[in-house]
Amino acid sequence: MFENSQENKTNLSQLGEFGLIDHLTKNFSPKLESTVKAIGDDAAVVRFEDKETLISTDLLIEGVHFDLAYMPLKHLGYKAIMVNLSDIYAMNGTATQVTVSIAVSNRFPVEALEELYAGIQLASKIYNVDVVGGDTTSSTSGLLISVTAIGHAEKEKVTYRNGAKANDLLVVTGDLGAAYMGLQVLEREKEVFKANPNSQPDLDQYTYLIERQLKPEARKDIPPLLNDLGVQPTSMIDISDGLSSEIIHLCKHSKVGANLFEEKIPLDPAVISVCEEFQIDSTMIALSGGEDYELLFTIKQDDFDKIKGNPHLTVIGHMTEENEGMHLITRANQKLPLIARGWNSMEEKD
């Protein structure tokens, strides 16, 4: 659960709610001009003047969104921030502040929460955001984390899901499927450990996949990159639930169809290799795996030359008229309906 499991543990009751907040946030100090007032009052105060304010919230629940059997708390804190910052970047904006709230059971000592907040602090430092508030309370069933991200964008730069037009190009950043396959590796090793607690897994060959699952990176670089290239996306979304789900979201909001070309989907060689090992189709993993936190967006065809050859961006298809529907064009040139099989937290489990 956290790095040094042998050290003495401090019970949460020794600090109390406000003492715990003070203890966990003592190393957080605002760095940005837009942060007028951070932790320590009834509300944070931020100021963006003439820019549009962006706000996004995500909730992470133990046993639903993460498993502490293989998720170190420091990584969890880092990931909780990434999940939220990704939503701001998906609006073509700049993230500037976050608030962090936790509900925690008494099985967690103070030292465990220090690990969690060390990850939060590292993420906020690397991504240049201020932690400006939050809350703590008790939980009867484990750990819950709620993060709200705040950011801004110039009015004409904000990118919504509903702006795509027929014939726009469909573009994705980075590569897909690695986070899901990292999860499969970790789940497999968890079962091996349960059967034999003395086993020592060799995970060297899975480093990239596991890092993409445990310590994803939000694409802070993409909004300024597009701005430098002179490209204004017509629609945008982040890939949290799988490529197919996100394409369908863009299509429904924009009232268009789409053709996605299987051969264009960017896959890391490590993903292809481990998919063969698990005997899983790599295209299905890219379509349905989720948690990649890459950005999916559309651009006008006239902008193709501006992004052509950029190593961060891949054109994977184009938008069509709504009545043409949403399709995957396979390597065999078959046209298959695009179906959302991404992760659904509300789905009933057996």
Image (cartoon, rainbow, N blue to C red):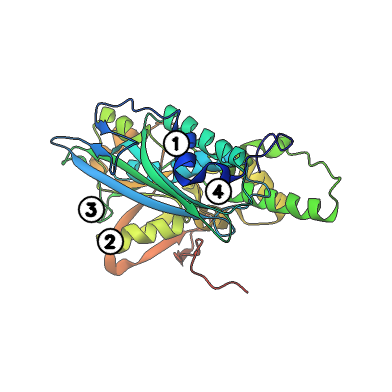
For the residue pair 96 and 292, the one nearer the viewer reads as 96
The three-letter code of the residue at mark 2 reads His
User: Are discs 3 and 1 less than 8 Å apart at CB?
Assistant: no
- Along the polypeptide, which appears first: circle 4 or circle 2? 4
Instruction: Give the number of the mark in front: 4 or 1.
Output: 1
Q: Secondary structure at mark 3?
A: loop
The three-letter code of the residue at mark 1 reads Asp
- Along the polypeptide, which appears first: circle 3 or circle 1? 1
Q: Mark 2 to mark 3: distance in Å?
A: 8 Å
**Mark 4 neighbour density, 10 Å: few (under 14) some (14–19) many (20 or more):** many
Can you identify the residue that label 4 sits on?
A: 177
Where does residue 183 sit, x and y in percent of width and height?
Answer: 63, 50
User: Are discs 2 and 3 less than 8 Å apart at CB?
Assistant: no
Q: Is residue 46 left or right of residue 57?
A: left
Residue visible at 52% across and 54% down?
Answer: 331
- Along the polypeptide, which appears first: circle 3 or circle 4? 3
Q: Secondary structure at mark 4?
A: loop
**Mark 2 neighbour density, 10 Å: few (under 14) some (14–19) many (20 or more):** some
Q: Is residue 238 left or right of residue 322?
A: right
Image: 268 above or below 317: above
Which quadrant, please, contains the C terminus? bottom right
The three-letter code of the residue at mark 4 reads Gly
The quarter holding residue 328 reads bottom left
The dot on residue 253 is 2
User: Are discs 4 and 2 less than 8 Å apart at CB?
Assistant: no
Where does residue 321 sit, x and y in percent of width and height?
Answer: 26, 63
Can you identify the residue that label 3 sits on?
A: 163
Q: Mark 3 to mark 4: distance in Å?
A: 26 Å
Q: Is residue 49 visible?
A: yes
The quarter holding residue 269 reads top right
Can you identify the residue that label 1 sits on?
A: 22
Q: Mark 1 to mark 2: distance in Å?
A: 43 Å
